[in-house]
Amino acid sequence: MKAVVTGANGFLGRYVVRELREQGHEVIAGTRRDAPELTALGARVVSLDLGDREALRNAFKGADVVFHTAAKTGVWGKR
């Protein structure tokens, strides 16, 4: 299975990547920055901005499943 994990460098995403790789699946790890620890697991790390539709289309092309674990961090909205 070919899987894309958004937010792959986050708390949940890295565990999803690790589990998928341990099961032998091909993983594309979408992150905002370099992630050598994900590369070491055998995932293909790609720069992914959820606001960039073209980047998302390219990352998702040919994928069997997408695990969307990305989230907006920090304070947003009125306090």
Image (cartoon, helix red, strand yellow):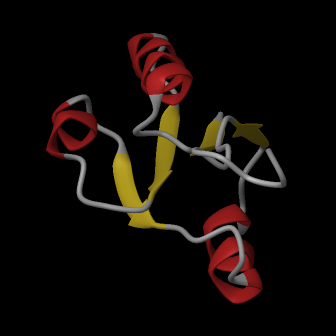
Q: Residue furthest front?
A: 79
Figure quadrant of residue 70: top right
Q: Who's the residue at 24% across and 48% down the image?
A: 35
| Nearest to the observer: residue 43 or residue 9 | 9
Q: Residue furthest right?
A: 78
Please say if 21 is above or below 59: above
| Nearest to the observer: residue 9 or residue 18 | 9
Q: Who's the residue at 40% across and 39% down the image?
A: 9
- Please identify the quadrant where the C terminus is shown: top right
Please say if 26 is above or below 63: above
Q: Position of residue 41 (x, y in %)?
A: 25, 28
Q: Who's the residue at 68% across and 83% down the image?
A: 52
- Please identify the quadrant where the N terminus is shown: top right
Please say if 55 is above or below 78: below
Numbered marks: total: 0
Q: Who's the residue at 40% across and 18% down the image?
A: 18
| Nearest to the observer: residue 52 or residue 61 | 52
Q: Position of residue 42 (x, y in %)?
A: 27, 36
Q: Position of residue 36 (x, y in %)?
A: 15, 45
79 relative position to 17: left or right: right
Figure quadrant of residue 65: top right
| Nearest to the observer: residue 42 or residue 13 | 13
Please say if 45 is above or below 4: below
